[in-house]
């Protein structure tokens, strides 16, 4: 079966940086609902359209097509006293944006002299990414999956 709108696609992927260093890969396959449901990068979805089980796509994504550009406004310096615990590089914290009501995840990138640098950008923001995916299987989505806009069951969402 070829991947088309409202197909459930199960795949394995690997992501590489511009130096071809492995950044991430699936241990277990992932599933997404094909057809504009925002379950995967749009350019990867476009490359997968029409593919079948066993097919491989290997594409390069510019930052705007992947995790976005670095936003300098999302990098802040905070006094360590504002944190509920002793902060260390690599820790992650959630913070509410009072203007939008959104919740941002910040990661601590540096701690020195009683100050912590926190970054709300995705760790891969600003990077060109090579995305290589192998299609494990393709099936028709159920009416419920289409209505909910995501895959249910194994490798998908559980209600």
Image (tube, helix red, strand yellow):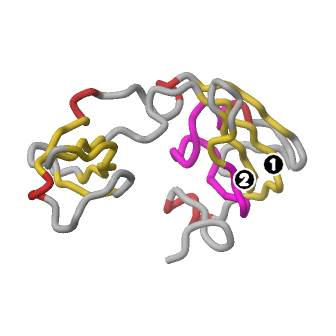
Q: Which mark is first along the chain, 1 or 2?
A: 2
Q: How many marks?
A: 2
Mark sitting on residue 135: 1
Tell me the number on the disc at residue 9.
Answer: 2
Q: Nearer the viewer, residue 36 or 32?
A: 32
x and y, in percent, of residue 64 in the image: 47, 24
Query: Viewer-nearest of labels 2 and 1?
Result: 1
**Residue at (61% x, 43% y) in the render:** 35
Q: Label 2: how many residues lie within 10 Å, few (<14), some (14-19) or many (20+)?
A: many
Q: What is the residue that sits farthest to the front in this orientation?
A: 113
Q: Is residue 150 left or right of residue 136?
A: left
Range shown magenta: 25-46
Q: In screen coordinates, is 140 left or right of 157?
A: right
Residue beneath the point at 58% across and 44% down: 40
User: Which disc is residue 124 wearing?
Assistant: none
Q: Secondary structure at mark 2?
A: strand
Evaluate if marks 2 and 1 touch, with contact meaning CB atoms under 8 Å apart. yes
Give the quadrant of residue 110: top left
Q: Quadrant of residue 3?
A: top right
């Amino acid at each position: 079966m070829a991947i088309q709108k409202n197909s459930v696609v199960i795949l394995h992927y690997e992501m590489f940086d511009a130096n071809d260093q492995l950044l991430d890969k699936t241990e277990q396959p992932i599933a997404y609902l094909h057809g504009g449901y925002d379950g995967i990068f749009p350019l990867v979805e476009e490359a997968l359209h029409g593919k079948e089980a066993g097919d491989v796509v290997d594409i390069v994504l510019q930052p705007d097509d992947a995790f976005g550009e670095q936003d300098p406004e999302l990098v802040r310096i905070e006094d360590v006293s504002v944190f509920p615990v002793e902060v260390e590089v690599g820790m992650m914290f959630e913070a509410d944006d009072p203007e939008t009501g959104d919740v941002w995840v910040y990661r601590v990138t540096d701690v020195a002299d009683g100050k912590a640098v926190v970054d709300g950008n995705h760790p891969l923001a600003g990077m060109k990414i090579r995305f290589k995916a192998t299609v494990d299987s393709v099936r028709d989505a159920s009416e419920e999956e289409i209505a909910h806009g995501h895959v249910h069951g194994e490798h998908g969402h559980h209600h």
